[in-house]
Image (tube, rainbow, N blue to C red):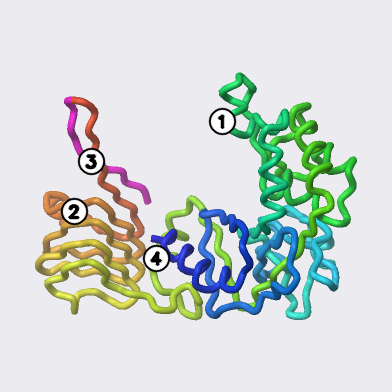
Amino acid sequence: CHLDQLLATLTERVCRGSPPGVWVSSTDMFLTVPAVPEIDWRNFQGVKVVAVPASISYARQYGVYSVDSQGLVQDILYQSSEEEMQWCLGPDGKVPLVCGVVFFSCRAAEQLLATHVTPPLNACTYMGLDSGAPALQLSLFFDLLLCMAQAVTEEAFVAGHKTGAGAGDTQAARSARTVLWKTLRTVPLTMAYLPDGTYKYMTSSAREHICRLTPQLGDAHSRGFCQVAHSSVEEPRLLEEGCSVTNCLLEGAVVVGPGNVIQHCCLQGPLHIHSGCLLTGLDVASSAALRSHSLQDVVIQGHRIRLRHLSCKVFTLSG
């Protein structure tokens, strides 16, 4: 599970040596950090964001930090032009990519938490909702962290000029950003750059998902890859290099070609899975149905459904 790997990466590497505080991380990405990074925590106060190197072409789809020579964040650029991102290039020819990991010192966390009873920010919590306030959604980066960036003006921040701002340009959102500006503007926002780190955003693409679950040449994420995990394979010699089998029972001649991902399945041979497939939740009965078909570049998922007195199994096919 990528959540297990993300938790291990954070606790064993990124968070090591940090002072008391609150770590916040998004979960819609794969973060790889080969070694414990050298993050300077001496005399730290405020908020620290974590960034990894990326090419401008890749970073254009996401966010980039603009920092000064002292590591203080000046701005957060979102889906900006190549010309704007040129100013963010480091000595390694890469830009610092926003990777969804943020650390709040105890003092900064307390300052932020103190706003949860202040209208309209209380509408972001159950307390405001229980009082009848309409729900208000804020962005961690464009509604909270952005007000700490040195080069951002109060007028631009409150107006919500940044593309991708979570709350948009409603009156409630502007009022919320006004409160956040008064509360958090003086909090220092610094960046920790992990030169060996890599970041891959999780998309809805099946092909990209399969690539994340199979070893890729030269990919740091593939280090320590285990081809067969928590599975029983009767004829392991039929598993070709570059496939992945997890939590499965493979009986008889089940040939699994390169670039295939098999999870939570009970398959019985003879069966030939060529390449580029993602199979999950299939049983022995499914094996018999699949033998007469060419399995290549398809996604087949089995789902057990129980609704009161209705119990059935539903299959989805794409590709």
Magenta stretch, residue numbers? 309-319
Q: Which residue is mark 4?
A: 213
- Dot 1 or dot 3: first in sequence order is 1
Q: Secondary structure at mark 1?
A: helix
Q: Is residue 291 above or below residue 43?
A: above
Circles 1 and 4: CB distance less than 8 Å?
no
Residue at mark 3 to residue at mark 4: CA–CA distance:
23 Å
Q: Which residue is mark 2?
A: 290
SS majority, magenta? strand
Q: Which residue is mark 3?
A: 304
Which label lies toward us, 3 or 2? 3
Q: Secondary structure at mark 3?
A: strand
Q: Which residue is mark 1?
A: 126
Other residues around mark 1 within 10 Å, as few (<14) / some (14–19) / many (≥20): few
- Dot 1 or dot 4: first in sequence order is 1
Residue at mark 1 to residue at mark 3: CA–CA distance:
34 Å
Other residues around mark 4 within 10 Å, as few (<14) / some (14–19) / many (≥20): many
Q: Residue 93: x and y, percent? A: 75, 77
Q: Quadrant of the N terminus?
A: bottom left
Which label lies toward us, 2 or 1? 1
Q: Secondary structure at mark 2?
A: helix
**Residue type at the position of mark 4:** Leu
